[in-house]
Amino acid sequence: MSTIINGTSGGSHISGGPLTTQLSAEVSPSLLRNEIDDRIVKIRPMATPIDQISRWAGARNCGSMVVDYYSVDTKPTTAKMVVMYDEVGIAGATSHQVATIYTDNDVIFEPSETILVPSVKGYKDDGITPAGSLVLYVVSRPDSGGVNVMAANGKCFDEVYNCVPSIAAGVELVRMGRAATELDVQTAQFEAMPTKSRNYCQIFKAQVEQSTLQKIANKEVGWTFNDQEEVAIIDMRLGMEKNFLFGHMSRVYDPHKREEVLLTGGIWNQTPRECRYAAHNFTTDTLVEISRMAFTENAGSKRKLLIGGSGLIEALNKMEYTKVIAAGDTVTKWGIDFNEIHTKFGTLYVLHSEVFDACGHSLDGIVIDPEYLTKYSHVPFRTETLDLKKSGVRNTDAIVITEASCLVLRYPQAHMKITAQIP
């Protein structure tokens, strides 16, 4: 008789008999994948692209139905002047006078950093001839507010060289790199604190039954129990796709079952970024604007997915492509056939989703960075056989398909909604 022996480092060993599937399932339940679990990514992948991609990449196991996860944002790189700085305020007998400027986000600037002012002219060494954009050096940031800066290529004013020229309110400042001295061994500290977010795993289920008489009856076509399983999985995945996209995170108390139900939140509401376009006037310029927003502003990878409803995909198909925007070949990734669109900002893998149409978003879409799409699974996709005959319920063969999971966007800024403005 086979005996299971615990190993010295947490493993398991079989002694006294051969290794069987029953023993394998007992010792390592995830080693032998269920037949349906193995087939699931092959069942209509084009209809459920979000669910498909998350399964292909593999899910992270979570020990609770409530998933707490962290996403890391990046430090802002721009700020705007809130008070005009007037160069007349500069006076003195030495060069590189220190000036105090006030922005809408002073705290992003640290001593020794440099600042670019793209819309303000800098000057050559004579302080008179314009040359390039103004560059500032941060001297300090007073507790009373504002930022003390000096000009690297400033203006000559009252025979004082490298004065900070006038900067109007509303002008954008771009934070650049640090500039240390020869003896500097330290610089201002910088730590990125991740933002905590939460989502609920939703328990998805489907049950398939077939009576004994139905099983043994002669049929005109080979309709088997496995065929019924496949249809059930298709319907289950379509429902999951809708929840993963447009679901609302909530706790609901069912008065009939007298139990609490957890509903998962969809990724549509997890990204704050949104690009709106005129539905009646979709042109090449529109796609350029969408691509620019999708691939800029610290927006992640240069290859992303654009999944949308039939109205948006129709507008993309009607568009004339140029040397700037080119339609590429069909590519297969994650078991799905995508059409490529190449722009100077990045590459979009485009796919129509029937779920967008079904949920009233035929003119909308979502740009997803697959690198930052994560699935959490509390109960992995599995099937269980129900013995309804022995329990005296029904004379049927029955299985129940279960998964408890959710999707999260770990870097919300890397994704973007596309919504239509209807006149």
Image: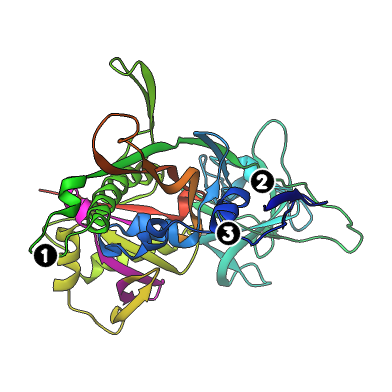
Between 211 and 116, the one nearer to me in the picture: 211
- Hey, which quadrant is residue 401 in on the image? top left
Between 198 and 262, the one nearer to me in the picture: 262
Instruction: Indicate which disc, 3 or 1, sits on the residue closer to the N terminus.
Output: 3
Q: Is 106 displayed left or right of 274 in the figure?
A: right
- Amino acid found under the numbered disc labelled 2: Ala
Give neighbour class at mark 1: few <14, some 14-19, many 20+ (Cα, 10 Å): few
142, above or below 26, in the image: above
Label 1 element class: loop
Q: Which residues are magenta?
A: 337-366
Instruction: Indicate which disc, 3 or 2, sits on the residue closer to the N terminus.
Output: 3
Name the residue carrying label 2. Answer: 192
Label 3 element class: loop
- Amino acid found under the numbered disc labelled 3: Thr
Is residue 369 something one can see in this rendering?
A: no
Name the residue carrying label 1. Answer: 221
Name the residue carrying label 3. Answer: 20
Q: Is 107 displayed left or right of 168 in the figure?
A: right
The CA span between labels 3 and 2 is 50 Å
